[in-house]
Amino acid sequence: MSRTALPQTPAEARALIRSGAWTGPTSGLAMGYVQANLVIVPKDYAFDFLRFCVRNPKPCPLLEVTEPGSPEPVTAAPGADLRTDLPRYRVFRHGEVIDEPTDISAYWRPDLVAFLLGCSFTFEAALVRAGVPVRHIECGCTVSMYITNRECKPAGPFSGPLVVSMRPVPAGEIARAVQITAQYPLAHGSPVHIGDPAGLGIADINRPDFGDPVEIRPGELPVFWACGVTPQLALARAKPDLAITHYPAHMFITDLPDEAIRAF
Amino acid sequence: MSRTALPQTPAEARALIRSGAWTGPTSGLAMGYVQANLVIVPKDYAFDFLRFCVRNPKPCPLLEVTEPGSPEPVTAAPGADLRTDLPRYRVFRHGEVIDEPTDISAYWRPDLVAFLLGCSFTFEAALVRAGVPVRHIECGCTVSMYITNRECKPAGPFSGPLVVSMRPVPAGEIARAVQITAQYPLAHGSPVHIGDPAGLGIADINRPDFGDPVEIRPGELPVFWACGVTPQLALARAKPDLAITHYPAHMFITDLPDEAIRAF
């Protein structure tokens, strides 16, 4: 492999990241393989967080839950180490960010449980393959995200609003976008809402709560998918003594081909 | 409603059961609504059992997990009471059956968590609607079930073999049977194995481990689906101090129409 080539396999990408040579976003690395959101909580919170995910599968699609104390995702990437194999992390104490390190070995405890949740990269790649335009990728910016007026189903201390991401889709392509993304329930699945931002309590579509605004052109409608920021907000509200997540856009790269999580 | 008519709605069926007037199997009650397997364990076991279900979604498709201490399935049947609304239960102490009552109020504890798991009734109804023959329904007997040589992914104390149910399907109907049942991932989904019983370690297809043998006619192949007995065996192996399940074929009737859990 040349020094400038991007790693092609998940194992190569994780090795590059683990070595400290790659600390940036993971989009474009090991294309065609599932990337995942990471949430780590103490075992005392893990049952409730797992119930939160089961009750809210669109924002929190479960790829894997590790054995308490083990940093190895034995199903999604056997041999990988979730303490070192992401480019950057966020560490929370009682809901407040206290560190954004590139390695969390120093924070690891034998009571920690790691959750891998599917992310939108998988369905966006499928949209692109099918020729459905994805504006924020074309623009090289971050997807628009909004806090909605819809509450998740709570579980123990975990609760909060549904957060959605928005992609403008031409009216004639929306049905295909629905059918394509519905094939990936472990990557947020089909849209939760199409058109009508006010129906989600979004006052101004041009002012997202997270990410960048993108242009909605004539003939396009805003299409809303459940977003992985949802569990982050629930985590911030639950305020466990320790929690660790991926840093935004700095994901865990699994060994699962995108097609392995395609439902049909 | 006349005295002899079967209850048509889930609420009517549960009321009849709760009153003690119905203590038999639930097939045929409230047709068109999802029926569920019930597993109840103490909270100390609930996280590991939930992980077991997440890791083995085909035999253990999760419909709902209750709040610890609450017998109300707020999503699947708000207002129902899992202590009284099934016709019969099995109560286990340390893995051994100690009682088969029609009401478990006397066993209820504030640390119990109830799991509702989808069952094959849902996909069998879909097969029948589509004109795919289902032999054991035609014969009025119990579906054939087999303990396979395939191990589930373990989680804490929960482990054990995959148990499958078998239905003979004409060779020309198997593809449709796959496509129809794949639409119901919360009711075991598509088959895990088609033909070749030896590939699952089944020595004699005419001697099921549970249920009745059924005839496999010329031109038919045995088709195997993951079975809800799987978590029962895992439960017996984990031996919690207390566990409660439905009595076989005496299910919980939810308010969910079958179509509500159809994935596509």
Image (tube, coloured by chain):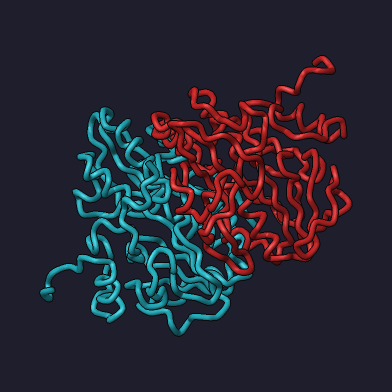
Chain colours: A cyan, B red
Of residues B238 and A10, the one drawn nearer to the viewer in this rendering:
B238
Identity of the residue drawn at 60% across and 71% down: A43
Residue B140 as seen in the image, left or right of residue B90 = left
User: At 25% across and 32% down in the image, what residue appears?
Assistant: A170
- Note whether residue A157 is visible: no
Q: Quadrant of residue A110?
A: bottom right
Quadrant housing the C terminus of chain B: top left
Quadrant showing the N terminus of chain B: top right
Q: Nearer the viewer, residue B127 or B139?
A: B139
Left or right of residue A196: residue B85: right
- The image shows a total of numbered marks equal to 0
Residue at image coords 33%, 65%: A253
On the image, the x and y values in percent for residue A27 come to 26, 60
Instruction: Give x and y (percent) for residue B190.
Output: 46, 41
Question: Along the line of sight, which residue is nearer the eye, A150 or B238?
Answer: B238
The answer to whether residue B73 is seen in the rendering is yes
Q: Residue at x 66, y 47 (%)?
A: B210
In the rendered view, would you say A66 is above or below B190? below
The correct choice, above or below, for A240 with respect to B121 in the image is below
Please state the horizontal and vertical placement of residue B27, each as a whole percent of the image: 69, 31
Camera-side residue of A229 and B146: B146
- Name above or below for residue B199 compared with residue B214: below
Q: Residue A93's x, y, as percent?
A: 53, 74
